[in-house]
Each structure stands twice: as C-alpha cells, then as structure tokens.
Amino acid sequence: MRLDSRVSETAAPVAPHHPIERRSYRWVALPLLAFALFSLTAGLLAHHDPRSKGYFRLFFEDPIHLKAAFASAAVALGCFQVFSATWIYGKLPWRKPAWINPAHRWSGRLAFVFTLPVAYHCIFKLGFRQPDTRVLVHSLLGCAFYGAYAAKITIVRLRRFPVPVLPIAGGILFSVLIGVWYTSAAWLYTRDTPSAAPAAAVVIPADAHAADGKSVFASAGCATCHTLKAAGASGQIGPNLDDLKPGYAQVVAKVESGGGGMPSFAQQLSAQKIRDVAAFVATSTRSPSVVTCNFGFRSGSSTL
C-alpha cells in the first residue's frame, strides 16, 4: 500500500465560497427614515416648558450632576465601542479574541441604558431649551442621538448593507454622543466651582428693588430649578436657595455669567431686572438684621 498516493482524486470537492449578497444603497433610506422619525419624536416630546417636579438625583449633588455623570459613563463605553469595533474589523495588530464581539455588543447596550436617566430629565422634565447657543446645540444633538441610535440598530438588524454603511453609522452615533457630552458634562465640569460662603451682612444697592424682583423670579422661570419659600418655589434641579442663602453680589454674578449647570441670563434679563431678582433672593433668605441697604452716600450705610 502506497501512503504517498494522491487523495485529490477521491476526496469530495470543496464547496465554493459565495460572497454575501449586499443590499443596494437605496436601502439606506430605511435607517435615514428611522433617524428622522426618532429624532423628531424626541423633539416633540421635549416641546414643553421646564417642569419643577419629578426629578431624582440618587447620590449626586443634584439632577444636573447626575446627568453629567451618566453621560460621561456613556461616553466612556462609547470609546470602548470604537476600540472594539476597530479590533473586530481587523484594524489592530492583535489577533481578535473570542470575547470581543460579545463585549462590543454589551458595552453598546449598557451605554444606551446609561443615557436613559439623562433622556428622562432632558426630554420629560427640562424640555427643549434654547437660552443660548450652547443649550440649543445640546438640545438638537440630544434629539439627534436617539435618531442616530435607531438608524444604527436598523442597519444591524436588517444586515447585508454595503460595507461602509455600518462603520459610518457607528461613527456618526459616536460623534453625536461626544457632542452631547461636550455641550453639557464637559461644560459643567470646567465651570463647576464650589459656592462661596455667604457674607455675614448683605449690601443691597439703592437701585435694586426686591419687591420687583419677585415677579422677575417668576417670569424668568427661576422657580423651575430652585426652591425659595418666599416665592412659593419648590424646584429640585438647582440649589435650594433657602439653604444656600446667597448674597446679592453672588446672585448677580451667577445670573449674569451662569455656571454650575445654570445658563447665563444676561441676554434674557435687563441689568435692572438682574439687580431686582438678586435683591429679592438675597433679602428673602435672610433676616432683616443682616440686610444692609446702601442709599448711595459717600460713606456709611443705613441698616434696615
């Protein structure tokens, strides 16, 4: 018996490998439709004035910091999504391990779950807002994120799209997520400074009228975010002003410049209204014995 005889003559022929039949680019209209539908739905659901009830903060300082933390966690998982996708597509110099595909899928699912507390507060509580360019861009990107997510899921579920479609969809989704995070959490963390301790005595200028400031507090929507007993406000988003007891100058600076999750109101309120609302907040959170009214004399002041 010859062991070196040919076996090719008797071996079964190898079945030819058929390439995957790809869909035409016309099918891209479906994920584009999903993008438009979900983005528009998110925008319509968010089309309301900010609501003062129903927020939660878990173990965070306030709902704003909760949103920033969950958004940051979603971005971290999004970065892993990009890294693992690059590995899956064979663009890294290492052999692809068996666990990378499940890890890629589950990191995407977990990232989506982390966005849900953010979406709850933004869509159903704060609403679509545009007090300045940053907040407007953040609102638009927030709606676009869920549209981009729906588009990517559509591509994954239907399969057989042209090869570039899925990576492009994933890249757009990641870019939108980064934009949402940059216009919210990154902005908050770079401007979030501890509140200064209130001064022992509060000086109110003569041209600041606390009585008029009460109506400004209401019309500007301050009650949506803050609790202030004198205004009948019980907002849960921002600091409790009765507990914080900010001084006049502190309120003026915060209203004019924003910070700590609060947008600037310099474009929405006149200088007089800012002085009035600052006087109202400062005087409402203190007893009259520590409020000093400056009547404009060259020196000295009159204590109320």
Image (cartoon, helix red, strand yellow):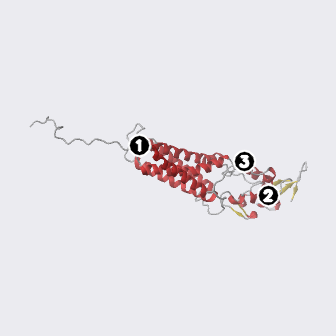
In this view, 202 is above or below 21: below
Residue 299 in picture, x, y percent from top left: 90, 49
**Residue that badge 2 annotates:** 213
Residue at 51 percent across and 55 percent down: it is 113
Looking at the rendering, which quadrant does residue 61 occupy? bottom right
Disc 3 designates what residue?
Answer: 257
Q: Which sits in the foreground, 57 or 113? A: 113
Residue at position x 37%, y 46% from top? Answer: 98
* Horizontal side of residue 205 vs 10, given as left or right: right
Q: Residues within 10 Å of mark 2 (few under 14, many from 20)?
A: many
Q: Is residue 2 left or right of residue 274?
A: left
Q: CA distance from mark 1 to mark 2?
A: 60 Å
Amino acid under label 1?
Answer: Ile
Instruction: State how far apart marks 1 and 3 are (Cα).
Output: 46 Å
Question: From this viewpoint, is residue 167 visible?
Answer: yes
Type of residue at label 2?
Answer: Gly
For the C terminus, the quadrant is: bottom right
Comparing 293 with 146, the one in front is 146
Q: Amino acid at mark 3?
A: Ser
Query: Are dots 1 and 2 in contact, CB under 8 Å?
Result: no
In terms of secondary structure, where does tag 2 sit?
A: helix
Q: Quadrant of residue 20?
A: top left
Labels 3 & 2 near each other (Cβ < 8 A): no
The answer to whether any part of residue 200 appears in the image is no
Residue 258: x percent and y percent? 70, 49
